[in-house]
Image (cartoon, rainbow, N blue to C red):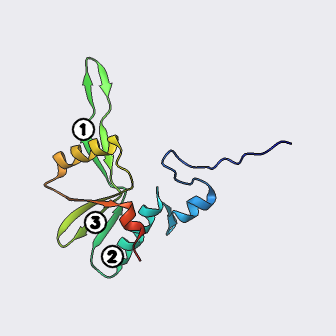
Amino acid sequence: MVRQVRLKRQTKYHVDTSHVGKAARTVDGITFASKAEARRYEVLRARERVGEIQNLELQPQFALLSPFECRDERISGIRYTADFRYLEGGEVVVEEVKGRETRDFVLRRKLFLKRYGEQYRYKLVPSAQVLTYR
């Protein structure tokens, strides 16, 4: 008897990449990296509709380190892509929804705060908090 093993289609962070998983992460035709990010987008869109926030932007990018040359070798720059950027009460907020903080994320957040900390208010939203919104 041959037994078929059905493999789950998911990333190393356990995000379901099947069509069912993508549907759960899709809002307004936009597929998000996680259900928490999709849910947070819904909340922010609702806040934008009632005028609490303005200019909601998805996936804003920030240069952390410009490209440079070292001993005739071209070194690429470092960029940070946040989840959201919006205007709230006259100040620009950069927001990140995270379930687990990776080493890469921690480093990029520190570089972001060093370079842009005075210019933007940075908000880290735990995914557990987002998924409990009602």
- Are the residues tagged 2 and 3 within 8 Å (C-beta)? yes
Please tell me which residue is depicted at 63% across the width and 50% down the height of the picture: 8
Residue under label 3, please give it. Answer: 86
Figure quadrant of residue 54 = bottom left
Q: Amino acid at mark 2?
A: Glu
The image position of residue 122, as x and y in percent, is: 23, 58
Q: Amino acid at mark 3?
A: Tyr
Return the mark for residue 65. Answer: 1
Mark 3 secondary-structure assignment: strand
Please tell me which residue is depicted at 26% across the width and 25% down the height of the picture: 69
Query: How packed is label 3: few (under 14 Cα within 10 Å), some, or many (20 or more)?
Result: many
Please tell me which residue is depicted at 26% across the width and 47% down the height of the picture: 109
Mark 2 secondary-structure assignment: helix
Figure quadrant of residue 87 = bottom left
Closer to the N terminus: mark 1 or mark 3?
1
Please tell me which residue is depicted at 45% across the width and 65% down the height of the picture: 38
The image position of residue 16, as x and y in percent, is: 56, 54
Figure quadrant of residue 125 = bottom left
Question: What is the residue that sits farthest to the bottom in this orientation?
Answer: 50
> Can you say which quadrant of the picture contains the N terminus?
top right
The image position of residue 98, as x and y in percent, is: 36, 55
Return the mark for residue 130. Answer: none
Disc 1 and disc 3: Cα gap in Å? 23 Å
Disc 2 and disc 3: Cα gap in Å? 9 Å
Question: What is the residue that sits farthest to the top in this orientation?
Answer: 71
Nearer to the camera, 34 or 115: 34
Return the mark for residue 48. Answer: 2
Disc 1 and disc 2: Cα gap in Å? 32 Å
Count of marks placed on residues: 3
